Amino acid sequence: MATRRPTYNVFVTYERSDVSTARAVAERLTSYGLSVFLDAQTLGAGAEFEDALWEAMWESEAVVAVVPRESRSSRMSFELGAAFAWKKPVYAVVGDAGPATIPVSLQHTVVLPLSRIDEVAQSVLRRPEPVSEADKKVLAEIYLQEGVPVDQLAVNPPRLDDVVKRFADATGRQVAGEEVMRLLLTMRKRKALPSLKQRSQKE
Protein backbone atom coordinates (compact mmCIF):
# COMPACT_ATOMS: atom_id res chain seq x y z
CA MET A 1 0.00 0.00 0.00
CA ALA A 2 1.34 3.45 -0.93
CA THR A 3 2.46 5.69 1.93
CA ARG A 4 0.25 8.75 2.35
CA ARG A 5 2.27 11.94 1.99
CA PRO A 6 1.78 14.37 4.89
CA THR A 7 -0.07 17.62 4.18
CA TYR A 8 1.81 20.89 4.60
CA ASN A 9 -0.03 24.22 4.97
CA VAL A 10 1.16 27.43 3.32
CA PHE A 11 -0.16 30.93 4.04
CA VAL A 12 0.02 33.41 1.13
CA THR A 13 0.06 37.13 1.98
CA TYR A 14 -0.45 39.69 -0.78
CA GLU A 15 -1.99 43.02 -1.72
CA ARG A 16 -5.24 43.30 -3.66
CA SER A 17 -3.39 44.75 -6.64
CA ASP A 18 -1.31 41.56 -6.81
CA VAL A 19 -4.19 39.08 -6.63
CA SER A 20 -3.42 37.55 -10.06
CA THR A 21 0.15 36.78 -8.96
CA ALA A 22 -1.10 35.41 -5.63
CA ARG A 23 -3.53 33.09 -7.42
CA ALA A 24 -0.76 31.87 -9.73
CA VAL A 25 1.40 31.17 -6.68
CA ALA A 26 -1.43 29.30 -4.95
CA GLU A 27 -2.23 27.25 -8.03
CA ARG A 28 1.38 26.14 -8.45
CA LEU A 29 1.83 25.31 -4.75
CA THR A 30 -1.42 23.34 -4.73
CA SER A 31 -0.17 21.28 -7.68
CA TYR A 32 2.53 19.94 -5.33
CA GLY A 33 -0.07 18.75 -2.84
CA LEU A 34 0.33 21.72 -0.49
CA SER A 35 -2.71 23.15 1.26
CA VAL A 36 -2.80 26.90 0.55
CA PHE A 37 -4.57 29.63 2.54
CA LEU A 38 -5.18 32.54 0.16
CA ASP A 39 -8.37 34.19 1.39
CA ALA A 40 -7.25 36.66 4.05
CA GLN A 41 -8.35 39.50 1.75
CA THR A 42 -11.96 38.25 1.82
CA LEU A 43 -12.33 37.80 5.57
CA GLY A 44 -13.52 41.34 6.26
CA ALA A 45 -12.66 42.89 9.61
CA GLY A 46 -13.32 42.56 13.31
CA ALA A 47 -12.87 39.75 15.79
CA GLU A 48 -13.91 36.98 13.37
CA PHE A 49 -11.29 38.14 10.85
CA GLU A 50 -8.59 38.24 13.51
CA ASP A 51 -9.49 34.77 14.81
CA ALA A 52 -9.55 33.22 11.32
CA LEU A 53 -6.30 34.90 10.33
CA TRP A 54 -4.60 33.94 13.60
CA GLU A 55 -5.59 30.28 13.21
CA ALA A 56 -4.59 30.13 9.53
CA MET A 57 -1.19 31.61 10.34
CA TRP A 58 -0.62 29.23 13.27
CA GLU A 59 -1.59 26.23 11.13
CA SER A 60 0.86 27.09 8.37
CA GLU A 61 4.28 25.50 8.03
CA ALA A 62 5.45 28.40 5.85
CA VAL A 63 4.42 31.83 4.56
CA VAL A 64 4.78 33.07 0.99
CA ALA A 65 4.76 36.84 0.54
CA VAL A 66 3.95 38.27 -2.87
CA VAL A 67 6.22 41.33 -2.94
CA PRO A 68 3.86 44.28 -3.57
CA ARG A 69 4.29 46.46 -6.63
CA GLU A 70 3.20 49.40 -4.51
CA SER A 71 3.35 50.11 -0.78
CA ARG A 72 2.15 47.50 1.70
CA SER A 73 -1.11 47.82 3.58
CA SER A 74 -1.29 47.55 7.36
CA ARG A 75 -2.87 44.11 6.90
CA MET A 76 0.07 42.70 4.98
CA SER A 77 2.46 44.27 7.48
CA PHE A 78 0.54 42.55 10.29
CA GLU A 79 0.65 39.18 8.53
CA LEU A 80 4.39 39.43 7.88
CA GLY A 81 5.02 40.64 11.43
CA ALA A 82 3.16 37.63 12.81
CA ALA A 83 5.05 35.26 10.51
CA PHE A 84 8.44 36.56 11.67
CA ALA A 85 7.37 36.70 15.32
CA TRP A 86 6.26 33.07 15.21
CA LYS A 87 9.44 32.06 13.36
CA LYS A 88 7.66 30.83 10.27
CA PRO A 89 9.83 30.27 7.17
CA VAL A 90 9.02 33.20 4.85
CA TYR A 91 9.50 33.04 1.09
CA ALA A 92 9.17 36.17 -1.04
CA VAL A 93 7.94 35.99 -4.63
CA VAL A 94 7.98 38.73 -7.27
CA GLY A 95 5.39 38.85 -10.04
CA ASP A 96 6.23 39.49 -13.68
CA ALA A 97 5.76 43.25 -13.34
CA GLY A 98 8.13 43.39 -10.38
CA PRO A 99 7.94 45.70 -7.35
CA ALA A 100 9.03 49.31 -7.18
CA THR A 101 11.16 48.49 -4.13
CA ILE A 102 11.62 45.51 -1.82
CA PRO A 103 10.01 46.27 1.59
CA VAL A 104 12.49 46.58 4.44
CA SER A 105 10.97 43.60 6.25
CA LEU A 106 11.76 41.37 3.26
CA GLN A 107 15.23 42.65 2.45
CA HIS A 108 16.85 39.78 4.38
CA THR A 109 14.59 37.20 2.72
CA VAL A 110 15.51 35.46 -0.52
CA VAL A 111 13.29 36.95 -3.24
CA LEU A 112 12.43 34.67 -6.16
CA PRO A 113 10.63 35.41 -9.43
CA LEU A 114 7.28 33.73 -10.04
CA SER A 115 8.96 31.40 -12.53
CA ARG A 116 10.87 29.79 -9.61
CA ILE A 117 7.89 29.13 -7.34
CA ASP A 118 8.59 25.40 -7.73
CA GLU A 119 11.68 25.89 -5.56
CA VAL A 120 9.48 27.24 -2.77
CA ALA A 121 7.19 24.21 -2.96
CA GLN A 122 10.13 21.82 -2.90
CA SER A 123 11.67 23.63 0.08
CA VAL A 124 8.43 23.36 2.08
CA LEU A 125 8.15 19.66 1.25
CA ARG A 126 11.66 19.07 2.59
CA ARG A 127 10.64 20.22 6.06
CA PRO A 128 10.51 17.57 8.82
CA GLU A 129 7.48 15.32 8.60
CA PRO A 130 4.49 16.63 10.58
CA VAL A 131 3.62 15.07 13.91
CA SER A 132 1.93 11.66 13.61
CA GLU A 133 -1.69 10.99 14.58
CA ALA A 134 -0.48 8.89 17.53
CA ASP A 135 1.62 11.79 18.82
CA LYS A 136 -1.34 14.15 18.39
CA LYS A 137 -3.37 11.90 20.69
CA VAL A 138 -0.59 12.17 23.26
CA LEU A 139 -0.63 15.96 22.91
CA ALA A 140 -4.42 16.01 23.32
CA GLU A 141 -4.12 14.10 26.60
CA ILE A 142 -1.37 16.42 27.87
CA TYR A 143 -3.55 19.43 26.94
CA LEU A 144 -6.47 17.94 28.86
CA GLN A 145 -4.26 17.35 31.91
CA GLU A 146 -2.79 20.86 31.72
CA GLY A 147 -6.29 22.34 31.80
CA VAL A 148 -5.44 25.67 30.12
CA PRO A 149 -7.46 26.74 27.02
CA VAL A 150 -5.50 27.08 23.78
CA ASP A 151 -5.96 30.86 23.57
CA GLN A 152 -4.57 31.29 27.10
CA LEU A 153 -1.60 29.02 26.42
CA ALA A 154 -0.52 31.37 23.62
CA VAL A 155 -0.04 34.20 26.13
CA ASN A 156 1.23 32.09 29.04
CA PRO A 157 4.82 31.01 28.16
CA PRO A 158 5.46 29.03 31.38
CA ARG A 159 2.38 26.85 30.89
CA LEU A 160 3.13 26.42 27.18
CA ASP A 161 6.72 25.45 28.05
CA ASP A 162 5.33 22.85 30.42
CA VAL A 163 3.19 21.34 27.63
CA VAL A 164 6.19 21.33 25.29
CA LYS A 165 8.40 19.57 27.85
CA ARG A 166 5.79 16.96 28.70
CA PHE A 167 5.18 16.30 24.99
CA ALA A 168 8.93 15.86 24.38
CA ASP A 169 9.24 13.49 27.36
CA ALA A 170 6.28 11.39 26.19
CA THR A 171 7.12 11.18 22.47
CA GLY A 172 10.85 11.86 22.16
CA ARG A 173 10.06 14.65 19.68
CA GLN A 174 11.71 18.03 20.19
CA VAL A 175 9.04 20.46 19.00
CA ALA A 176 9.12 24.24 19.48
CA GLY A 177 6.38 26.07 21.36
CA GLU A 178 5.04 27.74 18.21
CA GLU A 179 4.74 24.32 16.56
CA VAL A 180 2.83 22.93 19.55
CA MET A 181 0.47 25.91 19.37
CA ARG A 182 -0.03 25.32 15.65
CA LEU A 183 -0.88 21.69 16.31
CA LEU A 184 -3.33 22.55 19.09
CA LEU A 185 -5.13 25.13 16.95
CA THR A 186 -5.36 22.74 14.02
CA MET A 187 -6.73 20.01 16.28
CA ARG A 188 -9.27 22.39 17.79
CA LYS A 189 -10.44 23.48 14.34
CA ARG A 190 -10.89 19.83 13.32
CA LYS A 191 -12.69 19.07 16.62
CA ALA A 192 -9.92 16.63 17.57
CA LEU A 193 -9.05 18.48 20.77
CA PRO A 194 -10.86 17.36 23.95
CA SER A 195 -13.02 19.86 25.75
CA LEU A 196 -11.60 21.00 29.07
CA LYS A 197 -15.07 20.43 30.49
CA GLN A 198 -14.20 16.72 30.40
CA ARG A 199 -11.41 17.43 32.91
CA SER A 200 -13.81 19.33 35.19
CA GLN A 201 -16.34 16.50 35.09
CA LYS A 202 -13.67 13.91 35.95
CA GLU A 203 -12.57 15.98 38.92
Image (spheres, rainbow, N blue to C red):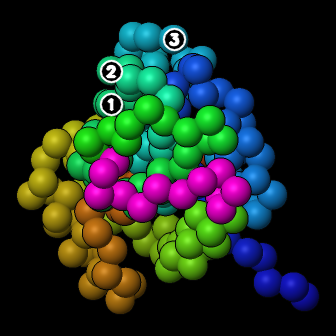
| Mark 2 to mark 1 CA distance (whole Å) | 5 Å
Please identify the residue farthest to the left as the structure is shown: 158
Label 1: element kind: helix
Q: Residue at x 54, y 57 (%)?
A: 112
Count of marks, rendered view: 3
Q: Magenta segment: does it hold 115?
A: yes
Q: Residue at x 32, y 31 (%)?
A: 77
Between 146 and 47, the one nearer to me in the picture: 47
Q: Would you call the spot at circle 1 few (<14 residues within 10 Å), some (14-19), or many (20 or more)?
A: some
Nearer to us: label 1 or label 3: 1
Nearer to us: label 2 or label 3: 2
Q: Would you call the spot at circle 3 few (<14 residues within 10 Å), some (14-19), or many (20 or more)?
A: few
Asked if 92 appears above or below 175 in the picture, the reply is above
The residue at which mark 3 appears reads as: 44
Question: What span is colored magenta in the figure?
Answer: 106-117
Task: Name the image quarter holding residue 191.
Answer: top right
Amino acid of disc 1:
Ser
Label 2: element kind: helix
Between 179 and 98, the one nearer to me in the picture: 98
Please identify the residue farthest to the right as the structure is shown: 1
- Are the two marked residues, 2 and 1, in contact with CB atoms closer than 8 angstroms? yes
Q: Taking 1 as reference, is 10 left or right?
A: left
Amino acid of disc 2:
Ser
Between 132 and 94, the one nearer to me in the picture: 94
Amino acid of disc 3:
Gly
Asked if 185 appears above or below 176 in the picture, the reply is above
Q: Where is residue 36 in the image (x, y as percent from the top left)?
A: 65, 46
Label 3: element kind: loop
Question: Could you tell which of marks 2 and 3 lies nearer the N-terminus?
Answer: 3
Q: Taking 76 as reference, is 85 left or right?
A: left
Q: Magenta segment: does it hold 31?
A: no
